[in-house]
Image (tube, rainbow, N blue to C red):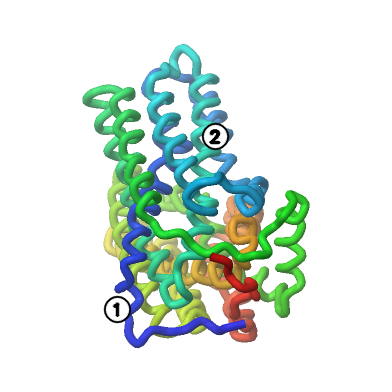
Amino acid sequence: MPSVAKPASFWDAFRDPKLALMLGLGFASGLPNPLAGDTLSAWFDDVGVPLASVAFFGGLVHLPYNLKFVWASVFDRFWPPFLSRRRSWLLVCQVALLVLIGALGALDPSKGPALVAGLALVVAFTAASQDIVADAYRTELLSAEQRASGVAIFVMAYRVALIVTGSLALIVADHVSWTVAFGMLAALMSVGVVTTLIAPPVAVPPRTPRTMREAIVEPFRELLGREQVWLLLFITMLYKFGDVFVTAIRTPFLREVGFTLTEIGSIVKLIGLIATIVGALLGGGLVAKWGLKRAMIVFGVAQAVPNLSYAALAVVGKSYSLLAVGIGVDNLAGGMGTAALTAFFMTICNRRFTAMQYALLTSLMTVPGRLLGMGSGWLTEHIGWPALWVASVVAAIPALVLLVYVRIVEPDHGEAAA
């Protein structure tokens, strides 16, 4: 079980031409995402669909992103007979998205919101499937020292795509039409198609699942049979716990402090976007330079401490400078932590079952925070805002302690077949 190698310097992590492929794949993965969220909701609201229906359909359409592990094993067991194991599925998903997004824009949600939501659900399922395969392909393509930097570039392109879909599409819809806006998004999916066609194949492990039962059962059996598996799983669930736990109440908190929606949108979204991209790129280089374990510990501390700035806001009240600094540092450290945690997932996935294990790990990453986050409002009512933000910092400690004791090594993939 080889340990993670390290390049000679920070910049060595970004020099391989394979990393340029992460730009196209990240953009293609990010482009459809808001169609299951803000963009779809804005479209429904613009044509007069009732708010209750907007909320219901919006929640329904986003479900495939939270349930990717349910069908991820299919991509480990089967693949179309062209290109290669991962690239063939990428191409199928991207071409399907190109057609589906264009078809979605030709519909009128004011006349048939259920039909539009149904097609949007198909788009979300296809986009989530593309994410599953893209994660698996990235994991199998990049060497150990390239993983974090590859993730950083992927995240940067993904965020750019979110701007295109979440902002540019709304502007086009406002000045031209929703049909043209969706047509533009459909055409931009060709970026992913071209990237997939020029991307190199990756070697297929000889012991890939031969039946669907193997594809579903063996990823769990192999993972649970490893040394220190419970440490690995608890780190997966707890590393981002503090962040996920307070996500749902961050905006209500800022509103209560006195910030307007415009101020929150301009400061949080703009500064947060830039800081996340810079943080991911910085984290990618530092993971390669320092090694994964050391980077995860440092970034784990760094992504927890900024929540103290929110505790300070709760005490002193509205402060633009304190919010800007807090948001900037929070997202910078969060981007670094995301690069490290994703590299961690890529390292511990067995390439025989990359799609299934990666999807499972990313689902586990948010489960504790999402579940306990449902009670964050109740907790705030009992202990107050300052104590809640301090508690979110303390919540980072268990994962950091576990990281001290865990050995991060790659599983035995078996010999690669050509």
SS class, disc 1: helix
- Classify 10 Å Cα crowding around label 1: few (below 14), some (14-19), many (20 and above): some
Q: Please tell me which residue is depicted at 31% across the width and 67% down the height of the picture.
A: 17
Residue at which label 2 appears: 61
The answer to whether residue 355 is above or below residue 48 is below
C-alpha separation, residue under disc 2 versus residue under disc 1: 40 Å
Question: Can I make out residue 258 in this image?
Answer: no
Residue type at mark 1 is: Trp
Q: Residue 369 placed where, x, y %?
A: 60, 58
- Classify 10 Å Cα crowding around label 2: few (below 14), some (14-19), many (20 and above): many
Q: Relative to the observer, which residue lies in front, 316 or 148?
A: 148
Q: Earlier in the sequence, mark 2 or mark 1?
A: 1
Q: Please tell me which residue is depicted at 64% across the width and 60% down the height of the picture.
A: 353
Whether residue 192 sits left or right of residue 414 in the image: it is: left
Between circles 2 and 1, the one closer to the viewer is: 1
Q: Relative to the observer, which residue lies in front, 171 or 97?
A: 97
Residue at which label 1 appears: 11
Q: Relative to the observer, which residue lies in front, 115 or 377?
A: 115
Q: Residue 267 placed where, x, y %?
A: 29, 53
SS class, disc 2: helix
Whether residue 52 sits left or right of residue 333 in the image: it is: right
Query: Are the residues flagged by discs 2 and 1 in contact, CB closer than 8 Å?
Result: no
Q: Relative to the observer, which residue lies in front, 188 or 75?
A: 75
Q: Residue 65 placed where, x, y %?
A: 55, 45
The answer to whether residue 181 is above or below residue 24 is above
Query: Which residue reaches farthest front?
Result: 418
Q: Please tell me which residue is depicted at 64% across the width and 63% down the height of the picture.
A: 352
Figure label count: 2
Whether residue 33 sits left or right of residue 369 in the image: it is: left
